[in-house]
Each structure stands twice: as C-alpha cells, then as structure tokens.
Image (cartoon, grey):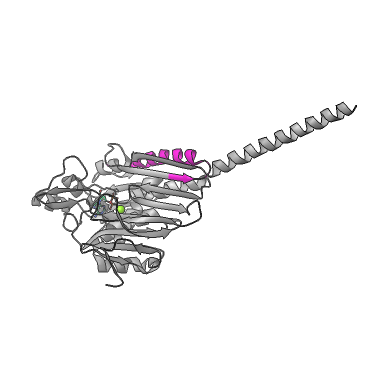
C-alpha cells in the first residue's frame, strides 16, 4: 500500500516537473519570438531597400512589403515599357489612360506638390531627364537646342486628371511624366501600412535614403536617424535627429550624378532651365508624417532656394526641414530645433537667415 502511494507521488512529481519544463519552454520561445529582429536588403524601385522589423511576424510582414513594392514599381516605373506611367506617356496628346488607385493618387499628389512648389517640382520633367540620361550607364550633356525644345514640353498644368474615370492624360504629343521624385515616398507609406497590418510596433523602412521610422526602437527610445554629409559619399553623417513615427527624406546632389571636365551634373533638374539645379542648397531633408509629402517636397525645395523653402516649410503644419548649403551652413525649421543635433563641427548651425 505504502509503495503504491509512494509510486503515485513520484508520478505526480514527474508530471508537475514536466508541466513546468514545457510551460517554461513555451513562454521562452514566445518571448524570443517577440524579441526577434527581421532584416532584409534588396533592390527595387531603382535603389537599395533595407527593411528592419522588430517583433513577431517580421519575416511575413517583410515578404508582403516586398510584394507590395514590386506592384508599385510595375505600375509606376518609366523603365518598364507597359507600366501605367509608360502608357500615359505613350498616349500623350492622343488619349487618356485609365490607371489604378495607386498611380492616380501618386500623380495627383505630384501635381499638388508642383503647385505648392511653384513648379520647381514638376513630373513632366521626364523629357529633360531622358535627354541627360543621369543614373544610366551613359549620361550625357544635352545640347542647348535639345534642352530648349524639350523645355516646351515641361508643364505640370498639361496633366489632366479625370477623377470620375480614374484616368490621366497629357495634353501634347511627346510629353512625358516621371514620378521618380515622389514614388519612393508613396512606397514607404505603403510598406508602413503593411507593417501596421501585422501590428508591428517597431520598424525601420529605408528605401534608398527615403526613411520611415515606425514606432520607437525596441527599447522604447527614439529612432536616431543620421543626416548624410553631402560632401562625403561614404555614408558619414553631419547630424542626428531623434524621431518616432516619422518620415525622413533627403534629396541631395550626391545621390546620382556624373562628372565632366571637373563639373558635377546631378539628377535634380530645374524645370526653368533644364539643367541640374544650382541653388545654394545641396541637401534638403523633410521630416513629415507621410513619406509621400516628404519626397515631393524635398525635391521641390531643393531647387527653390533657401529663403522661399524655409518660408514654405514653416507654413505647412506638421512638416519640418533641414537644409545644408554649399558653404556648409545648416538651417533647421522651428518644429525640430530640439530634436536635431549637429555631430560634425565642420558645419555651422544657422538659427536664422
Ligand atoms: P532620389 O530619387 O534620388 O531620392 P529625388 O526624390 O529628389 O531623388 O528625385 C529625383 C528624381 O526625380 C530624378 O531621378 C528624376 O527622375 C526626377 N526629377 C528630377 N528633377 C525633378 C523635378 N524638378 N521635379 C520632379 N521630378 C524630378
Ligand atoms: Mg523626392
């Protein structure tokens, strides 16, 4: 009898120990899963993309984001013959092209930013950008007459948006649009949406320097995003901004350019001249809630000149900017004076113009 009781107690002890072991294992793997970081680096939208997700389901979320990015690229790239944007361009001056909600929204936003930036941002710049072939293997300096004749095709007012039929047309033959100055911003916002669908609380979305910092770092501190030194292409930064749920987009002359006879020709074209922008600004960063706003504005204000740009950004609620000039001065708008810190002493912080 005693033996039987002893045996039973022994069995109960074994079961309890087993339950404890299994429970600890389950809790631990669950904890481990929530502490996981998923990172992927790949090429899309003509640039290097880095996605980092902290927490559960990171891998799945990243895979869905990649699929979404490919869809956006297929619809909007001018390098894909049958993308929706290419079809708008092929039908220029002839007919209207029905497009998806994605493309309609991006072109509509591009027109909005053209108006806001007084035409310094202008998606109809395509006919000039294609003359320069900047970013391709064989860039060139177009002749004055080529530029003069193609400049006649640059005018965002010739983009006709038909909301009812979801279609877009260009008024004149040979006109063409290029949403390269704004599409990455839209893509970053869409990646953010995918991540939010997975209830992700902490992620860093980097589409070739077009950054969205989702939530905070896993340790609950702000994300520290470096602002690149425009004089140094090795990825050195000149300062750091602490952010949470913000987009940080920079347009700079160091991203895509070529050199001829010692002169740098970069990829942001002034629609007034048809030549790379020559304002005193060589890097413009926009900090905003939506990355599409940051991308559209950063290209526009890069060309606009310092004074007008600061005025424009100060007039827009919830949007801030960091400008770096040729002579290494840094101008920062009022909303981020406390969150931006210069780390490179070669640069001079200017409080006012
Ligand atoms: P990146 O694409 O290198 O991040 P931007 O967002 O500043 O840089 O956009 C530059 C791209 O936008 C160019 O490669 C070109 O396709 C297009 N672009 C160039 N100049 C203009 C302009 N004035 N307005 C609108 N788009 C432009
Ligand atoms: Mg841009």
In the rendered structure, which segment of residues is drawn in magenta?
52-78
345 vs 126, nearest the viewer:
345
Decide if residue 345 is on the left or right side of residue 50: left
Q: Residue most toward the right?
A: 1
x then y, percent, for residue 206: 37, 48
Question: In the rendered view, would you say 176 is above or below 280?
Answer: above
Task: Name which residue lies at 39% across and 65% down.
Answer: 336
Q: Is residue 161 magenta?
A: no
Decide if residue 264 is on the left or right side of residue 194: left
x then y, percent, for residue 100: 39, 43
290 vs 62, nearest the viewer:
62
Q: Is residue 61 magenta?
A: yes
167 vs 283, nearest the viewer:
283
Task: Name which residue lies at 63% across and 38% down.
Answer: 26
Residue 88 in sight? yes
Query: In the picture, which quadrant includes the C terminus?
Result: bottom left
Question: In the rendered view, would you say 46 is above or below 328?
Answer: above
209 vs 273, nearest the viewer:
209
Question: In the rendered view, would you say 13 is above or below 293?
Answer: above
**The quarter of the displayed image where residue 237 is located:** bottom left
x then y, percent, for residue 338: 40, 67
**The quarter of the displayed image where residue 240 is located:** bottom left
């Amino acid at each position: 009898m005693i033996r039987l009781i002893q045996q039973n107690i022994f069995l109960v002890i074994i079961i309890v120990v087993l339950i404890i072991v299994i429970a600890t294992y389950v809790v631990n793997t669950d904890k481990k899963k929530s502490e996981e970081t998923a990172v992927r680096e790949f090429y899309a939208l003509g640039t290097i993309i880095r996605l980092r997700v902290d927490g559960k389901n990171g891998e799945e979320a990243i895979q869905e984001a990649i699929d979404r990015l490919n869809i956006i690229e297929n619809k909007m790239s001018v390098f894909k013959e049958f993308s929706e944007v290419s079809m708008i361009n092929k039908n220029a001056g002839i007919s209207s092209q029905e497009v998806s909600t994605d493309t309609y929204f991006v072109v509509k936003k591009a027109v909005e930013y053209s108006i806001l930036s007084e035409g310094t941002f202008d998606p109809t710049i395509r006919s000039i950008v294609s003359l320069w072939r900047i970013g391709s293997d064989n860039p060139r300096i177009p002749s004055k007459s080529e530029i003069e004749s193609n400049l006649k095709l640059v005018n965002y007012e010739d983009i006709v948006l038909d909301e009812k039929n979801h279609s877009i047309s260009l008024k004149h033959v040979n006109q063409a649009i290029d949403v390269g100055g704004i599409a990455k911003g839209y893509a970053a916002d869409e990646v953010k949406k995918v991540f939010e669908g997975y209830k992700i609380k902490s992620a860093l979305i980097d589409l070739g320097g077009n950054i969205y910092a989702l939530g905070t770092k896993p340790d609950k501190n702000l994300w520290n995003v470096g602002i690149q030194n425009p004089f140094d292409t090795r990825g050195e930064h000149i300062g750091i901004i602490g952010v949470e749920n913000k987009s940080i987009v920079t347009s700079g002359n160091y991203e895509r350019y070529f050199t001829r006879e010692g002169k740098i020709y970069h990829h942001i074209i002034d629609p007034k001249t048809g030549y790379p922008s020559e304002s005193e600004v060589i890097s413009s960063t926009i900090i905003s809630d939506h990355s599409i706003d940051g991308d559209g504005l950063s290209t526009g204000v890069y060309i606009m000149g310092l004074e007008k740009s600061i005025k424009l950004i100060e007039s827009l609620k919830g949007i801030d900017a960091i400008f770096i000039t040729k002579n290494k001065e840094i101008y920062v708008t009022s909303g981020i004076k406390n969150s931006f810190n210069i780390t490179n002493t070669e640069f001079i912080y200017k409080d006012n113009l």
